[in-house]
Image (spheres, helix red, strand yellow):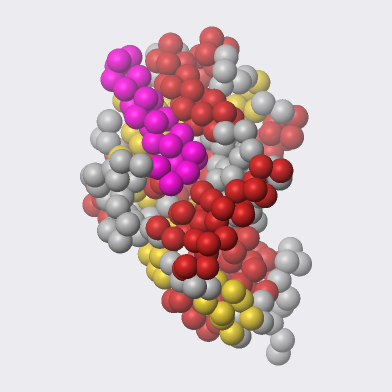
Amino acid sequence: MTAFVTGGSGFVGGAVIRALIAEGEPVRALARSPVAKATVMELGAEPVAGDLIDRSTLADVMSGCDVVFHVAGVNRMCPRDPTELDASNIAGAVTAVHAAADARIGRLVLTSSSAAIGERSGTLGTEDSVHRGRFLSRYERSKYLGEQQARAAGRERGIEVVTVNPSSVQGPGRTTGSAKLLLYAARARTAALLDTSFSIVDVDDCATGHLLAARNGVADRRYLLSGASLTMRSAAALLRRQIGRPQRVVWIPRGLVRAVAPFTGLVARIREDPAVCPATIRALLHGHRYDGSRATRELGLVYRSLEDTLERVLTWYRTHGMLAKPTA
């Protein structure tokens, strides 16, 4: 199949391109800047100029492809201007579906997010979880609405939209978002952490899940991609076994975290995309656990071990001088 990929210069989109190329599939990738063009060319894809706001041009460059992987999106929890989230994650997703239909492409794999599940606190999130009825962040809202509206557009236009919902994607090369927390803990003798729950998926497993969704996924259906769930306490213990850090953890009381949340909002008003804001605190306090077994049962996705993912990430950090090499 000839695949069209949006967001191919990003962390997940790049992994999708690598997976497609490894299987000998021709890939055409949207490139909206010279840097993006160079990146997708290096990955082995054919770069094409276009923009998610230009449906006509997008349909033209998609023409002749068999499947679209719409991976592009904005992943920010603390944006000063949230309209960028809506423009990319909602309007962009809908435009991609309409452009694919205009180009007579029958199937689109939509990269949503586990955040769109909206499971209630303390529950295990599945594809069929009842949404809690409120959003923890503007990012979560944008991914939820983008998914809903893209699937509705698919039904309207007669195109098969298969949705994948990755949990926190980790792997070699990621240095932003939650990866900053991992790097912090891996470097610290004493780390200050909040005990919460979270789920992760290896970036290569995430990419494989996209390809399997294109081939085996059911139209208008969700597939959570999540390989492991753990608590921050178990994560710190695993990291300590691997590299001896952090040697000590100071556990931050949840009440203190709630108390400082309003002050992080003040910082978010003056700094562009700060590391912490009220939305990130709400998400951390809520915690997340996701069940990724439907992707195994229906798509055939086999997840690698958490230890394997962690070892690959730590090796990449050391190779790039971000983490000290172990002493003999």
Q: At x 44% / y 22%, what residue is drawn?
A: 94
Question: Which of the 4 image quarters holds residue 319?
Answer: bottom right
Question: Which residue does the image show at 67% across and 49% down from the upper left?
Answer: 267
Residue 225 located left or right of residue 180 = left
Position of 113 relative to 235 (above/below)? above
The one nearer the camera, 196 or 304, is 196
Residue shown at 61%/54% (left/top)? 263
Coordinates of residue 107 in the picture (x, y in percent): 36, 26
Position of residue 77 measured from the top left corner of the image (x, y, whole percent): 55, 45
Q: Which of the pair 268/243 is nearer the observer?
A: 268
> In this picture, is 148 found above or below 203?
above
- Taking 224 as reference, is 136 left or right? right
Q: Is residue 7 magenta?
A: no
| 108 to the left or right of 170 | left
- Give the residue drawn at x 70%, y 31%: 37
Give the prevailing secondary structure in the magenta stretch.
helix
Asked whether 73 or 81 is in front, the reply is: 81
280 or 2, which lies in front?
A: 280
Is residue 136 on the magenta stretch? yes
Q: Is residue 122 visible?
A: yes
Numbered label tally: 0
What is the quadrant of the N terminus in the image? top left
- The magenta-colored residue range is 135-159
| Residue 93 x, y percent position in the rendering | 46, 26
Q: Which corner quadrant holds the C terminus?
A: bottom right
Question: Within the image, what quadrant is residue 314 found in?
Answer: bottom right
- Decide: is 195 above or below 302: below
Residue 72 sits in which quadrant?
Answer: top right
Work out whether 95 lies above or below 138.
Answer: above
Q: Is residue 244 visible?
A: no
